[in-house]
Image (cartoon, helix red, strand yellow):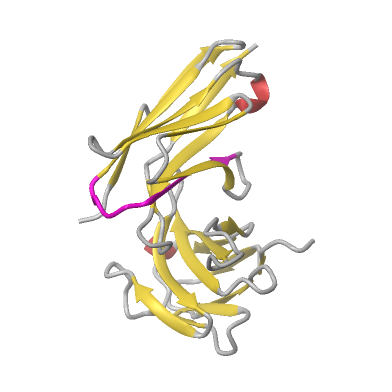
């Protein structure tokens, strides 16, 4: 499968714990996006990277959230001191810039986080 | 701020009928409008998209129309089939950046 992959698929944690999710984009896609989706809602933008540079971060994103893409390939999203309100599906998407690429964003299967 | 409104939130049609979902966006700089289909427990999948320099695009039973002046765009599905049942999301973006999604439409196609 050469699509976007995410790990783990499910994560259950206790309030106050830290969690980290990983996203592997489609090979050679230079843009990588993180979204959060709660039940019955559309995905909500969190942050995105072009190569290793973080270009935008949602103003709604608490400072407990941090994302990295150190080598411009895979990305990690860390949530510190988790709260019950962090329970959601965390989706990753990737796209390639034009000049032969497409601006279509392809989504991964998501990581479902449950905070007890 | 950036916002996309989507209507209706639920839509039930008989198999073979047409379905129309409408979205309105707030930022006039938006220039890319994709539609995603999401089945229960699965990832959003792109079904069609349109760019601001085009007024209409069609792919088999699916079409999208864009009215830049009114900042409206719509998804049209003809000859609906039970496998079209899913949640559909519209979205808008500026200069190939983040997607701003609508709230979703749960489409039910009854055999």
Q: Residue at x 60, y 18 (%)?
A: B80
Asked whether residue A61 is in view, the answer is yes
Rendered location of residue A101, percent (x, y): 60, 64
Q: Is residue A11 above or below residue B26?
A: below
Rendered location of residue A73, percent (x, y): 62, 81
Q: Is residue B28 magenta?
A: yes
Asked whether residue B35 is in view, the answer is no
Q: Is residue A74 above or below residue A89?
A: below
- In-front residue for pair B30/A52: B30
- In-front residue for pair A86/B31: B31
Q: Residue at x 65, y 11 (%)?
A: B111
Question: Could you tell me how many numbered marks the image carries?
Answer: 0
- In-front residue for pair A25/A15: A25
Q: Is residue B14 left or right of residue A53?
A: right
Q: Report the quarter where the N terminus of chain A lies.
A: bottom right
Q: Which residues are magenta?
A: B26-38
- In-front residue for pair B40/B59: B59
Q: Residue at x 35, y 59 (%)?
A: B94
* Farthest residue, direction right: A1
Q: Within the image, what quadrant is residue B66 found in?
A: top left
């Amino acid at each position: 499968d050469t699509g976007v992959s995410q790990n783990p698929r499910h994560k259950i944690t206790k309030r106050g714990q830290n969690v980290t999710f990983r996203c592997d984009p489609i090979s050679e896609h230079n843009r990588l996006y993180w979204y959060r989706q709660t039940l019955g809602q559309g995905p909500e933008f969190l942050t995105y990277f072009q190569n290793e540079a973080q270009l935008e971060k949602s103003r709604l994103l608490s400072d407990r959230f941090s994302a990295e893409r150190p080598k411009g390939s895979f990305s990690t999203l860390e949530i510190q001191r988790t709260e019950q309100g962090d329970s959601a599906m965390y989706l990753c998407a990737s796209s390639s810039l034009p000049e032969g690429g497409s601006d279509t964003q392809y989504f991964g299967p998501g990581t479902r986080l449950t905070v007890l | 701020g950036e916002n996309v409104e989507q209507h209706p939130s639920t839509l039930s049609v008989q198999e073979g009928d047409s379905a129309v979902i409408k979205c309105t966006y707030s930022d006039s700089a938006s220039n890319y409008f994709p539609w995603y289909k999401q089945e229960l427990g699965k990832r959003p999948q792109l079904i069609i998209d349109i760019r601001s320099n085009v007024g209409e695009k069609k792919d088999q039973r699916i079409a999208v129309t864009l009215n830049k002046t009114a900042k409206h765009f719509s998804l049209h599905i003809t000859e609906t089939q039970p496998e079209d049942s899913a949640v559909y999301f519209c979205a808008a973006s500026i200069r190939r950046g983040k997607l701003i999604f609508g709230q979703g439409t749960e489409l039910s196609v009854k055999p």
